[in-house]
Amino acid sequence: IQKIGMLIRFAGDLEQPDDETLRLYLQEHAERFTDPARVDLVHVYFDRAKRGAALESEATAALPALREIGEPRPGERLPGDAFLAGHRFENASAQSLAKLFGEPFAEFALAADAERWSGPAASPGGLHLLWVHDKTAARVSDLESVRDRVTRAVMAERRDRRLREFLQERRANYTVIVDEEEAARAEG
């Protein structure tokens, strides 16, 4: 059955979609071809294990001093604790931030004001104060940058439709009769 399905899906050449078809497909399936929002940031980390009950008060107390400093310069020593993955992240998506810091942190980072210290933002390991250098909003890709992906998606849908139509035509030639007693015995 799988071999027949493959043969039917890929039998004969399908016509390549024209630009208008590709534009419409991209418009109808924009979520599949959207570049996610991204952020460049520096964070100051306060380790929960190291700071214990003082975690929140120490993180909150550091915020006014950081705001006074303003934009962090590369290599500048900032308060806080060491963080294994580093303190600077560039072009980070919500997904990549969530892998390291968890969903709440990622949401906070993408919503934070740029060019201003904010926080604290929670992660499983502790609290973070953030300086967002730059933010890029999510955007639907232009057709030229995703033409190959959109073309493959359109062609795959056409092949799937060809297989469904083939199977519907074949099923129309047969009548299925279910023996209720036999079906009940097979289930039992």
Image (cartoon, grey):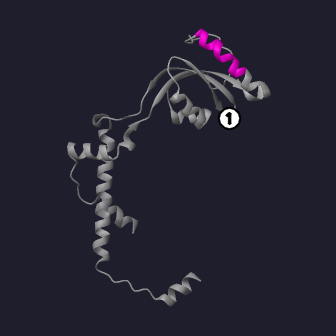
**Percent x, y of residue 187:** 56, 81
Q: Main secondary structure of the magenta part?
A: helix
Residue at the (74%, 25%) spot, across then down:
55
Q: Amino acid at mark 1?
A: Pro
Count residues near mark 1 (Cα–Cα under 10 Å), then give few for <14, some for 14-19, many for 20+.
few
In the image, residue 92 sits, relative to residue 117, either above or below, namely below
Q: Is residue 105 left or right of residue 33?
A: right
Residue at mark 1: 124
Residue 187 falls inside the magenta stretch: no
**Percent x, y of residue 147:** 29, 39
Element type at mark 1 = loop
Q: Residue furthest right?
A: 53
In the image, residue 4 sits, relative to residue 171, either above or below, namely above
**Percent x, y of residue 80:** 69, 18
Residue at the (61%, 33%) spot, across then down:
101
Residue 59 falls inside the magenta stretch: yes
Q: Nearer the viewer, residue 8 or 54?
A: 54
Q: Is residue 76 left or right of residue 114?
A: right
Residues in magenta, as a range? 58-69
Tell me the quadrant of the picture where the C terminus can be found: bottom right
Tell me the quadrant of the picture where the N terminus can be found: bottom left
Residue at the (68%, 21%) spot, across then down:
60
In the image, residue 78 sits, relative to residue 188, either above or below, namely above
In the image, residue 49 sits, relative to residue 4, either above or below, namely above
Residue at the (54%, 22%) spot, across then down:
41
The image quarter containing residue 160 is bottom left
**Percent x, y of residue 15:** 21, 52
The image quarter containing residue 81 is top right
Total marks placed: 1
